[in-house]
Image (tube, rainbow, N blue to C red):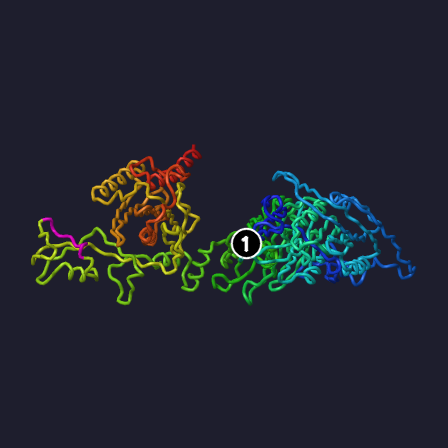
Amino acid sequence: MRKALNINTLKNRDKESKPGKLWNKKRERCIIGIAVLCLLLTACGVPSGGADGSKDLSAENSSDMETLSGGDSAEDQPDPETKEELKEWPVEHDSCTVQGLSGYLYEHTSASPYAGAEITVKDYQGERLSDGWDEPATFQFAGEADITWRYYNSLAEMETALDEAARQETEDGLLRFLYYTFPLTENDHALDLYQSLKRDFDEKGHPLRVWGVDRGKMVQFMQETLKEEDGYEYGYLQNRNSKINLFLKDRTAFGLTLLNMPTEDDETLEYVFEDVFGRHGEYSSGWELDEENLYWIDHEERLTELEDPKRSFWEVRGIDEGIMSYFGLLMEADYELSLTEDGRMLSLHFELSEDEKELRYYLLNGFCMDEPYDMTVTDLVTGKVLQERRVSLSIELPDTITYPDLNGDGYADMRVGAPAHVNGAKAVEDDYTSPTYLLWDPQTEQFERKTAKEVENSRRAVANGLTEEEQEEKTKRERSDTFAPVQELPEWADPEDYIKLVGEKMTEYEVQKGDCLWRISERFYGSGYEWTKIVRAENAPENPDYLLVGEIIWIPEIYYIPKDPLSRGGLRSEGSFQIEQPYGFAHYFLNGDLTYSPWKEENQIHSLPITNPVGENPFHGPEAWEAFQAEAIRCSEELCAGKVSNLTFEKYQMEDGCDLYGYSFEYDTGEEIIEYVDFFKFSYANMSEVIGVREQEPNTVMLNTVRYMAASFTDYGGKPGMGWGDDGTIPNVGADLWDYPYLHNLFEAAREQFEKVDDSAEESVS
């Protein structure tokens, strides 16, 4: 996203910093540009149309812009019939204190629109006076400035003279500037000036930048000198290698060029530039501009016509005043396209809705917004209007709307991008929002809006020869269950790629002659080291090496959950904890607002490792886990009477010595069944709770994914993680309604969300 620039960095500068100190370009930038006019006024010869070569309606019949130098415009040259002699302007000498230099230059009345002043200063000293962060900058200067004014009949004449002045030797210890001012002619535009300067000055290490300042009333062209120090890049503007520092206001340019300075890093020189240009307007903040934005500085409208398919766009200036006037608002867009290669031609017309044509908040804060357009689809052969509807679009550039065959049915569909204003020259998607889609329905002969998921379902339906409804059911049945636990590993499997869980269910085994716990463990678990998990009867011999033939023992079941190879490994706090974020699932940071949102991705999974508030595993003993189950059953009956079904509990032991606990249930809202899953794990200093919510489906994808994420939680035994208690953490939903305030009460979460819906429905009926 485009970032606002804090230009007046002196307000934030450390007052104790020594002169010549650099500052980080990424955080703050001094806008003290230096311009060498002898190079500035190079010819550009760019037409007055847009950057893409489109036609400018505001200058439809104008000729190409005269070059800024190397050839005067017609109004600058004497009439060849009268052969009027150019006026001889007298040279003027003046002086003032450096303290009063900015006011003198600002108030000076030039005898000619083309004026240049050579300024020399001896014994220069300057400092910034102490002032508040919200007060205008004030400066204190010492020294006298000698000023020599010269006037010219044209820009080219002024360039030649100042070029000669710039080449003169400067006495050591003398501060020397060139100040100049000239107007833009009728056919000169800010974009033309930028293209000319960029062609001649933009280079590696000395980039040319343009900023809109004073709430869009001024434009500043400046060239930086970049340097690196300790791996950071810094920008200098009080440097003789920075050749451009030019302001444009009311179509008049004001420039200041540094020709010589006593020391290379004299930081006080910034004050001279800031003081001089500060007279023309407030430039403490602004936006960096590109060619698209510069076009709208001095144009009111633009018509662009493109082919394949044929399309045209009428744009007008977005807002009359301020920074947002640098953006064009699309008023109308027309497309002509063929539905199929040999099919009929359609016309699609988009027009900004009548009640929005005076839109004052277009591109609020620089972001594309969804604007309401009236869309009309017409058959070009018969003239019949096939469809009229209002659509919500973010149209920034001509290529934002495209017409690919999204589902493979042979008909053109519509893809509407949602770009963000990063540079205006390229549509950048996904920084603001995802694109939208409209599929053509050949039965109804209309475009229907679809989500990305629905588009994919339609594509599969076409490929499989099914209806969209049939394909959706097929997809649900065949959806892969990535984290489904297995009881046996494949022969080629690496145990490191799996998480091992030991469940509460037992397999009964009768001891045979020659058995020992080690061999039995190898047989069931694949390793003899798991023999301690084997359970013997209470009256069995205490010696583990002594087994009785015919003795009954119990082997707890072992499950293996495959790890996600594409996991993003999120929520990592070095030395503290980590929990996996499986690729392809909608993951959210867990807080008190735990709700089901049907418009989000189908598997909504929330997680949050936090500091273990109880300092131990409160459910390790069988009695404690049984008590939790009883409390959960009570809440399901009292808080969600008659709405909870299939309440199931799970408990596993893990290799890291921790236990994994979980429960799941189905909640009947009266219109649909919502599945809830909750797994939690206590460890050294932290704990993790993972919750999944979705509309009921005939598979266990969410259940297994939630279990996997909770099981993947790793506590490194370091510093506690997210804190607890009075540190601003949102209380768990329903924490005060059961005996476990450190866990979310999903029964209360379901009741709060869906009973509110019921209450509102009852109120609307009454």
Quadrant including the C terminus? top left
**x, y (%) of residue 616?**
28, 43
**x, y (%) of residue 136?**
66, 40
Asked if the magenta segment contains residue 2, the reply would be: no
The answer to which image quadrant residue 69 occupies is: bottom right
Residue 144 placement, left or right of 715: right
Q: Is residue 117 above or below residue 355?
A: below
The answer to which image quadrant residue 747 occupies is: top left
Nearest the viewer among 560 and 274 is 274
Can residue 57 be seen by looking at this rendering? no
- The residue range painted magenta reads 531-538
Considering every residue shown, the one lying at the far right of the view is: 82
Residue 724 placement, left or right of 351: left
Can residue 89 be seen by looking at this rendering? yes
Nearest the viewer among 228 and 733 is 228
**x, y (%) of residue 309?**
60, 63
Secondary structure of the residue carrying tag 1 is loop
**x, y (%) of residue 381?**
61, 61
Q: Mark 1 points at which residue?
A: 418
The answer to which image quadrant residue 548 occupies is: bottom left
